[in-house]
Structure formats: structure tokens, C-alpha cells
Amino acid sequence: MAQIMPFRGLFYNPEKIEDIKAVVAPPYDVISQDMQDMLYHRHPDNIVRLILGKTYPDDTPTKNRYTRASLDFKRWRSEGVLVLDERPSIYYYVQTYILKSRLKKTRKGFIARSRLEEFGKGSIHPHEKTLSGPKADRLRLTEACRANFSCIFSLYSQPDLEINGLLEDSINDIPIIDVVDDEGITNKVWKVDDQSFIESIAKDIANKPLFIADGHHRYETALNYRNLIRERANTWTGNEPENYVMMYFSNMDDEGITILPTHRVVHSIPNFDSKAFLLDCSTYFNIEKIEFNEKIEPRVRKEFFIRMEEMADIPHSFGLYMEGVNAYYILTLKNRGIIDREIADTIPETFKEMDVSLLHSLILDKILGISVKAQEGQRNLIYEKDSDTAINAVNEKCQLAFLLKPTRIEQIKRVSEAGHVMPQKSTYFYPKLLSGLVINPIE
């Protein structure tokens, strides 16, 4: 059973920080080197110094990005840069954004503490694999600072949108945070401290399974940190703050949910031959070729993207672009029996309707020879969320770009409920949640 509770969030003090945009940041795992530098220079108290501090050649086990984060965090609190909320609350977080299609959407959710549960033993389900490196990094940061600086992003299902209605009824017109980020996304946060509203929301969420959309590494880190503290403790009641993690809850049935695809760019395949590769693919796929010359390529590319959108509901299909070939391709599986014949025992049944699983199992592994281990190690793969960037990477130095359609929310739900995890980078929930809006001190 999912259990949530309010908490006294830490916020940037508006009396010290006049422009909240100067101190917030995207999640650590999407911050590039250039963006890190920019955020460092933007403000000396930017949250990046906590979530992704710089490393230096003279770092030691006792002087490093984690010890610096701890010192900055303590100093910001002691100097009043960060202030603790007066009362335990949950926080209504709304993001309004515009897609490339110019469609304007609003995603609604709330931030609360969520009781930790082991995967497979409760109502919280993952949908993607995790790697040991990021979890070790996040654990060192949590040990150093004893705080959650970024939210786990979870989804629940409630077609009648009752929780959204409760949240709307509980707020006034003036948010405590109102900031437009670097991507032009409007982020607003309202405080909800009325106990009756909190109890109603907690009751509604209690009987619902939760699906982690983003933040798998941070969730498993929270579990590892709890277990570490529990092992060191003389007594343990189960109510210690380490038993909870800061989580954002959003309704998967709300129209504000957007999942973008993450495309695959392939490089460094020895002796790659485009004609031989297409011939191998033709055994399993019908291939539609859209040719172009340099003069008309921009128009043809747009038409190709439109064609991909038109095929959104057609299973087992994706786009392809290759080095040295003036054409775009759309590959569509010839028939469902190919899956059962070629990869029947290699992937779970719930994966067989997913384009990303078919691509990884049938093309990357079977045709191109990129093993599952190599895929997980990203040995020949680059993951890219922007389709133009993926195509341009092939024009510059890579060999193939596979353009995927978005994974559907119902597919994520089925995979998670079955206890499976999808290949890495199978989903990209947009927009990302800002770090630095609210902090959960583990105390």
C-alpha cells in the first residue's frame, strides 16, 4: 500500500534569492559539462553545486564534490539562504509547456514524502534498468548531505481525476514559486497544509500502485541509504525519516502527461555495409524508402517526421537513417509470427508489442551483433531525444540512427505490473522536474 506524508520542505529564501531561476537546475543526469559551467556562473548558490558538484584534479577522499556539497548545504542553511517551511505540507507542482507541434499542455502533480518499498514487495513498480555507477554516486551524496534534492517522478492511475480536483480546491491564486525555466516551461508550486485535504489525498493514493517514471537510480539509492542507516542503528522502529523519500505524484490518466521517444544512434560497427544491412532487415521488415537530394532534404525530412507521426498506432515500426545514403526509411515488421519464431524466448511476453524491445533484440543484437551486455554498457550506442540531432550525428561521424515512436503509457503499466524492466532509455517523460524548488531534509 502506497503511504505518503507531508513534510517541512526546505526552500530558497526569497529575501536572499530575488530570482529563483538563478538557483534552480534540471535533474543531475541531464546536465552536460557546458550546462554545469553555466549554472555555476549563474549564481554562487545554484542547486547544481549540491546535485552535481564539479570535480578537480586535487580531490581526495576527504575533499571532493560530496564534501563540498555538504559544506555548502550546511552554510546555506545557517546563513538563511535555505529556510524550513513552518508546517508539514505537501506541495502542488504544475508545469505548463509547449511541444514542437505547438500544442500547449499542463501537467499537474504533488510532492510529498513516500514510504520506501522494495521492488516486487509492495505497490511501487520500476520500469527501467539501473546501473551501479550512478547509484554509488547518489549514495555518497545522500550520506554527505542527508537530504533529497530532487524528486522521484511517479505515476498513478485515477481516471476521474479526483486528486487533481482536491489539489485545485486546496490552493489560492498565488503560488509560492512561479518560475519560467531555460526551456520556456512555466513551473508553479503551491503549499497545501490543510490537514483535511492532505488526509483525503493520502487516502486516495493509498490503494493505488505507483509506477516510477523517472528517478530509478535515486529511488534505489534511497533504499540503499535506508538499509545502511538501519544496519548501523541500535534500534529501528520503521518510522525514521530514512524510511521515506521525496516523490512527485502525477496522474497518468491526465492529458498533461507527455512521453517523448529516445532515439538510438549506432557507431563503430566494424565493416558496416548499408546494402547488406538493408538486405538482412528485409527478411523481417517491409521497408519504405523516401529518397532525397541535398536541395530538397529539409522538406523531405519534415515529411519523414510527419509520416512517423502518422504511424503512431502501427506496432513494430520505426524510422532509419544511414551514413552515405540519401534516403530515409520506415521499417515495419512483416508479421507477428516473426517475433515468436526469432526472439520468442529472449524477451518477456509483455515486451513483444514494444518497438524498442524489437529494435534491441532483433536488429541491434541479432543483425548488428551488439550484444545485450554491449547495449547496457552503451558500447556502440548513443541515446538522443532530439530526432534532428540523431540524424545530424550520422551525417557527422556515426553510422545509423533509429528513430522511435514514443512508448505508450499503457505499455509501461503492463511491463511494470508484470515485474519486468524495459531496456535503458525506453521513455523520456517531458518536461523534467526542476531541482531546487523544494528540498526534503532527512531529519
Image (tube, grey):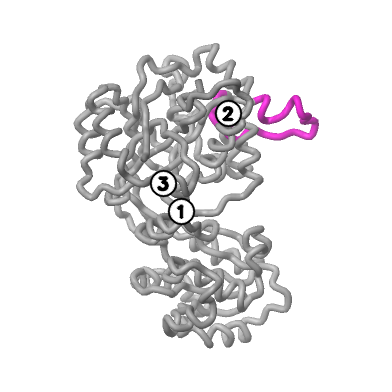
Name the N-terminal-most of marks 3 and 2.
2
Range of magenta residues: 45-68
Residue of label 2: 230
Q: Give me the residue at 50% from left, 76% from top.
A: 295
Alpha carbons under labels 2 and 1: distance apart: 34 Å
Could you say which quadrant of the image residue 198 lies in?
top left
Q: Give me the residue at 69% from left, 72% from top.
A: 269
Circles 3, 2 touching at the beta carbon (< 8 Å): no
Circles 3, 1 touching at the beta carbon (< 8 Å): no
Residue of label 1: 428
Q: Nearer the viewer, residue 177 or 118?
A: 118
- Helix, strand or loop at label 3? It is loop
| 17 over 51 or under it: above or below | above
What amino acid type is highlighted by mark number 3?
Pro
Residue 20 forms part of the magenta stretch? no
Residue 53 forms part of the magenta stretch? yes
Alpha carbons under labels 3 and 1: distance apart: 9 Å
Furthest toward the top, the residue is 79
x%, y% of residue 311?
36, 73
x%, y% of residue 376?
63, 59
Residue of label 3: 431
- Helix, strand or loop at label 2? It is helix
x%, y% of residue 89?
34, 24
Main SS, magenta residues: loop
> Pointer 2: residues within 10 angstroms few (<14), some, or many (20+)?
some
Which quadrant is home to the N terminus? top left
> Pointer 1: residues within 10 angstroms few (<14), some, or many (20+)?
some
Label for residue 381? none
What amino acid type is highlighted by mark number 2?
Arg
What amino acid type is highlighted by mark number 1?
Tyr
